Amino acid sequence: MKMYLALFGVLLAGRLMAALAVGDVVPVFTAKDQHDKAYVFTNGPTFLIVATEMAASKVANQKLAELGAGYLEKNQAVYVLDIHTMPGVARLFALPKMRKYPQRMILVDSAETLAVYPTQADRVTVLTLTPDRKIKALHFWDPVHEPLADVLK
């Protein structure tokens, strides 16, 4: 009996930590943007753009800056960056630079918040959502070679 309970626990833990997929509902989360303003992700956005790797996020930041202020809002998109692994010293230099970007950047400082998001090396995850946060489509954006407009359709 103990063996079955242990196996069930392992399977349940694995399911709880499984990456989000089409059909799943994206969990609500709270964070702050680069200007230290509170943000609550809840129902509404059509696209959730999640950058978890530093190299891909640097290119994505530049591409979004080139698109100008208001581009994300116009396309009902939210841009989230994973900063939980960024050392304190690096933050001293990175955060002032982030404040200069025209797009709003939601800075997630918790490994648990982003642990369920699917990722691919050198890519930025883009989730297409229904109004109630259900994933309709999943795309891994290559900001080096692919225009964001091609993804936000």
Image (cartoon, rainbow, N blue to C red):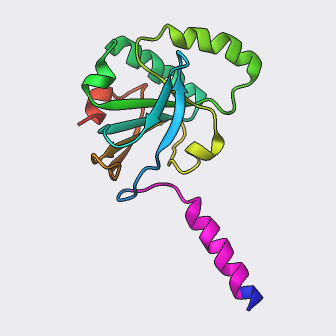
- Stretch in magenta: 4-21
Residue lying at the far bottom of the rendered structure: 1
The quarter holding residue 74 reads top left
| 69 over 2 or under it: above or below | above
- Image quadrant where one finds the C terminus: top left
Query: Is residue 7 shown in magenta?
Result: yes
Magenta: predominant secondary structure element? helix
Q: Is residue 59 left or right of residue 82?
A: left
| 124 over 119 or under it: above or below | above
Q: Is residue 124 left or right of residue 107?
A: left
- Image quadrant where one finds the N terminus: bottom right
Between 122 and 88, the residue placed more toward the observer is 88
Residue for point 64% across, 79% down: 8
Estimate the x, y position of residue 111 in percent, counting from the top left. Answer: 64, 42
The quarter holding residue 55 reads top right
Estimate the x, y position of residue 121 in percent, counting from the top left. Answer: 54, 40
Residue for point 29% across, 39% down: 46
Estimate the x, y position of residue 41 in percent, counting from the top left. Answer: 43, 38
Between 4 and 55, the residue placed more toward the observer is 4
Q: In this view, does 58 lie to the left or right of 4?
A: left
Between 6 and 22, the residue placed more toward the observer is 6
Between 56 and 101, the residue placed more toward the observer is 101
Residue for point 40% across, 54% down: 25
